[in-house]
């Protein structure tokens, strides 16, 4: 094996980061399976009482919709259908915000050779640096006004999204998708 930094042809270069430790998302959990797991850790009677619903209905939600006698579509499947029919992911964003989280849409996979790993890595590092620059600019006077806070929040949201895209591309070996994505802007100007 050549020493570190020795030239090699592209045919002999291995890209261990492209697929190493690749997360295999083989089984996508069904909504009723999730509810069954949640119910195992919760007081289902209290849930039914708080929601003003019957205990049997709450338990039916944890059964497959196609199960004989179920005939009840659970709230998670209804939300999924609503998002699909409207094509509007603000519903998902609202739910994740209510749970003190955030929503990041997964990038589409193109499956090219990972030639763009280094530029993609550099782009993520640059995006972190851009966020730090926005924070430093806002904090230089030891006070952060609402417009500056909004600029920091906007840059942070872009960074989370870009980083999630990078991680997904690492898992899938898809770095050209990152290379072809437009770079986010520097954020709003300070007022």
Image: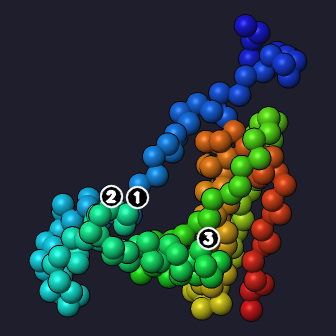
Q: Residue at x 18, y 60 (%)?
A: 40
Left or right of 128 in this view: 21? left
Q: Quadrant of the N terminus?
A: top right
What residue is shown with label 3? Answer: 156
Say whether residue 71 is left or right of residue 84. left
- Residue that lies at the very extreme toward the front in this rendered image: 68
Residue 45 placement, left or right of 183: left
Report which residue position mark 2 lands on: 33
Q: Position of residue 106 (x, y in %)?
A: 63, 59
Q: Secondary structure at mark 3?
A: helix
How far apart in space, not on screen, are marks 3 and 2 (Cα)? 33 Å
Between 175 and 155, the one lying in front of the other is 175
Q: Nearer the viewer, residue 32 or 39?
A: 32
Mark 2 crowd level (few <14, some 14–19, many ≥20, 10 Å Cα) = some
Indicate which disc, 3 or 2, sits on the residue closer to the N terminus.
Answer: 2
User: Closer to the N terminus: mark 3 or mark 1?
Assistant: 1
Is label 3 in contact with label 1 (beta carbons under 8 Å)? no
Q: Is residue 18 above or below residue 82?
A: above
Q: Which residue is mark 1?
A: 30
Packing grade of label 1 (10 A; few <14, some 14-19, many >=20) is few
The residue located at (54%, 70%) in the rendering is 103
State the residue in front, 124 or 140: 124
Q: Residues within 10 Å of mark 3 (few under 14, many from 20)?
A: some
List x then y, in percent, for residue 59. 21, 70
Residue in the image at 59% along x and 74% along y: 84
Mark pair 3, 1: CA separation: 31 Å
How many numbered badges does the structure rendering display? 3
Q: What is the x, y in percent for residue 56?
A: 17, 76
Callout 1 touching callout 2 (CB < 8 Å) = yes
């Amino acid at each position: 094996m050549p020493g570190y930094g020795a030239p090699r042809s592209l045919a002999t270069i291995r890209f261990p980061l492209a697929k190493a430790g690749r997360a295999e998302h083989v089984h996508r959990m069904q909504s009723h399976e999730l509810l069954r797991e949640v119910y195992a850790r919760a007081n289902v009677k209290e849930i039914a009482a708080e929601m003003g619903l019957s205990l049997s209905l709450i338990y039916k939600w944890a059964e497959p919709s196609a199960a004989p006698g179920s005939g009840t579509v659970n709230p998670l499947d209804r939300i999924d259908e609503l998002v699909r029919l409207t094509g509007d992911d603000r519903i998902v964003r609202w739910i994740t915000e209510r749970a003190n989280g955030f929503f990041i849409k997964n990038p589409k996979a193109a499956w090219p050779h990972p030639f763009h790993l280094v530029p993609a890595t550099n782009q993520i590092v640059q995006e972190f640096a851009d966020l730090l620059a926005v924070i430093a600019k806002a904090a230089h006077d030891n006070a952060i006004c609402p417009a500056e806070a909004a600029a920091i929040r906007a840059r942070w949201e872009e960074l989370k999204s870009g980083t999630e895209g990078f991680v997904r591309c690492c898992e899938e070996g898809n770095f050209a998708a990152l290379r072809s994505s437009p770079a986010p802007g520097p954020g709003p100007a300070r007022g």
